[in-house]
Amino acid sequence: MNERHATIRLKGLKVATPVAAESIPRDLVPPDGPAGNPALTLEFEGFGPVCTAVLNGKSYRRMLKALAEKGPEGITILLQGTLKPGPGGLPILEGAGISAVPRAPAAPAVEEGGT
């Protein structure tokens, strides 16, 4: 069997992925004052570091607030950015953003067999 293969060159690769609430560091930004630009190293389970994401501290703080208010079952944490080559070999997630997207409430169950 002759498998065909080709290469497509990209400047970057857009990434948007949900992140488990239990993996979110709660102390990456201070609760008050300047939030700075916190950085996260992203890893594949069982593989190791994949890239570094530098985030806006204010958006990180907003996500933490939503997580505290609604709990992990009330939001989906979304990390997004453009994966690009980085200095020193480890790629970076350029323009990285993290947000808390509210989950829609579950629809009420409808009972069957009623008259």
Image: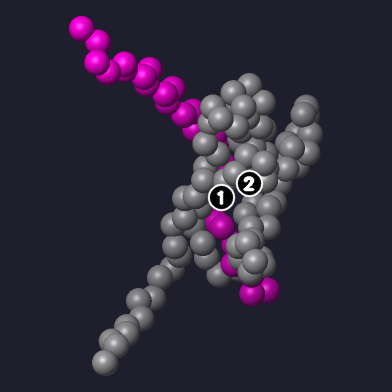
The residue that label 2 is drawn on is 55
Can you give x and y, in whole percent of width and height, for residue 11 in the image?
43, 68
| Circle 1 SS class | strand
Tell me what residue is drawn at x 29 percent, y 88 percent: 3
Disc 2, disc 1: CB below 8 Å? yes
Quarter of the picture containing the C terminus is top left
Res 1 quadrant in image: bottom left
Q: Residues within 10 Å of mark 2 (few under 14, many from 20)?
A: many
Q: Earlier in the sequence, mark 2 or mark 1?
A: 2
The magenta stretch is 88-115
Callout 2 amino acid: Leu
Taking the spot 69% from the left edge, 51% from the top edge, the residue there is 39
Q: Nearer the viewer, residue 26 or 115?
A: 115
106 magenta-colored = yes
- Location of residue 2 in the rendering, given as x and y in whole percent from the top left corner: 26, 92
Q: Amino acid at mark 1?
A: Ala
**In the visual, does 67 lie left or right of 31?**
left
Query: Could you say which quadrant of the image residue 62 lies in?
Result: top right
Q: Percent position (x, y) of residue 49?
A: 66, 65
Rendered residue at 68%/57% (across/down)? 41
Q: Give the residue number, with chain letter if any, for mark 1.
A: 96
Residue 4 horizontal side relative to residue 51, left or right: left
**Which residue is painted at 64% across and 51% down in the image?**
54
**Is residue 65 shown to the viewer in this render?**
no
Q: Tell me where residue 30 sits by quadrant.
A: top right
